[in-house]
Amino acid sequence: MAFKHKHLIDINEYSAEDLMTILETADSFRAVNERRVKKVPTLRGFTVVNMFNEPSTRTRSSFELAEKRLSCDTLNFGGSSTSTVKGESLDDTVATLCSYKIDMIVVRDKHAGVPRKVAEKSGVHVIDAGDGKHQHPTQALLDLYTIWKHKGSFEGLKVGIIGDIGHSRVCGSLIPALKKMGAHVTLIAPNTLLPARPDVLGADTVTTKLDEVLPELDVVYMLRIQRERLEGAPYPSLREYSMLYGLNRERERLMKPDAIVCHPGPINRGVELDSFMADHPTHSVILDQVYSGVLVRMAVLYLLLGGSEDENPA
Ligand code: CP
């Protein structure tokens, strides 16, 4: 059966069953990525534009790799090297790209809502690769995949998301995704880094006290302080923030022995994570998350571009 979605823009439009289909499809692509010739002809003839109007290391590189490993033609586009700096509008830019008979646009933009606008204007498949403070659906999917592979299931799993929740697009997708899969989600942050109405994010609990909840957590998900999105100073100093909310050698003693530590990257080492925890041989799964990014992006490209849910694409 063909996958029923045309776009991946808002994770709230996906059911738990849809999310599981993506995780299982991602898992089937593991074999492709672990053999000598890491390429299948599955999407030969399709053209995907990666339109990144904001910096990215992980998302951009893993989309490009995922496309190439599926044999798509890819066009990398965006930022200060385009005619948007000469005043060309988003609509005209999209119309120009669509003249090339493309099949999909992957969009990262600092403004919330741009992927939806691109979908409306272009008529082709669109994947949101992170828009403003709104959503980052493929990040949530790679996080789900990593947690699933390490923990086996989501039901009743205790996940704590710690840090700059108010400025996080990762939270916009990850919290609803975890809730759909049956996890229990706690948000942990100083009040100044929470949105005005944290309840609307859909987590089960919200607290300012990391040390009280850390011993219960199966998944410790650290967020980066989004310095580029801060207005004013929401805490006295990075040192004080790190003392109260940073994950470090001292706090490791409070954690469950089998708790995993996730971070979407890039890490501010010494702020939300010290190097002991970021590189911890058993707790840290941060590089697994990066690898999962290729797998889930291959799965999403395959399913949205017409792949069947029922056959093994690898
Ligand atoms: N997690 C994430 O989106 O990282 P990049 O900004 O490097 O893509």
Image: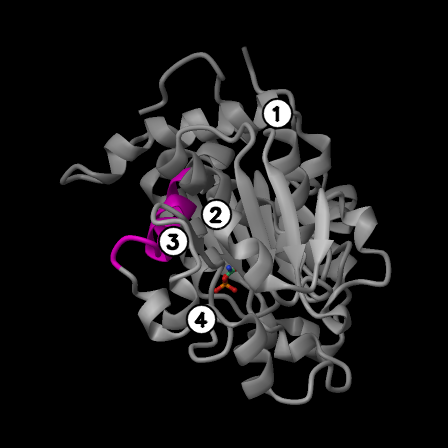
Q: Separation of disc 2 and disc 4 at Cα? A: 15 Å
The amino acid beneath tag 3 is Val
Q: Secondary structure at mark 1?
A: helix
Q: With 200 as the anchor, is 169 left or right in this view?
A: left
Amino acid type at circle 2 is Val
Quadrant of the drawing holding the C terminus: top left
Q: Which residue is mark 2?
A: 219
Front position among marks 2 and 1: 2
Q: Earlier in the sequence, mark 1 or mark 4?
A: 1
- Which residue lies at the image location 46% right of the left edge and 68% below the top edge? 247
Q: Label 4: which residue?
A: 273
The part of the image, by quadrant, that contains residue 42 is top left
Instruction: Answer with the quarter of the image where residue 73 lies.
Output: top left
Residue 16 badge: 1
Look at the numbered discs 3 and 1 and tell me whether their residues touch, using CB distance below 8 Å: no
Q: Is residue 198 above or below residue 265?
A: above
Specify start and end residues of the magenta stretch as a single range: 281-295
Cβ at disc 4 under 8 Å from ligand 1: no
> Label 3's element?
helix
Q: Which residue is mark 3?
A: 290
Q: Position of residue 290 (x, y in %)?
A: 38, 53
Where in the figure is residue 132, as x and y percent of width and height? Answer: 71, 63
Q: Position of residue 55 (x, y in %)?
A: 54, 70
The tag earlier along the polypeptide, 2 or 4, is 2
The residue carrying mark 3 has its beta carbon less than 8 Å from ligand 1: no
Task: Determine the CA span between mark 3 and mark 1.
Answer: 23 Å
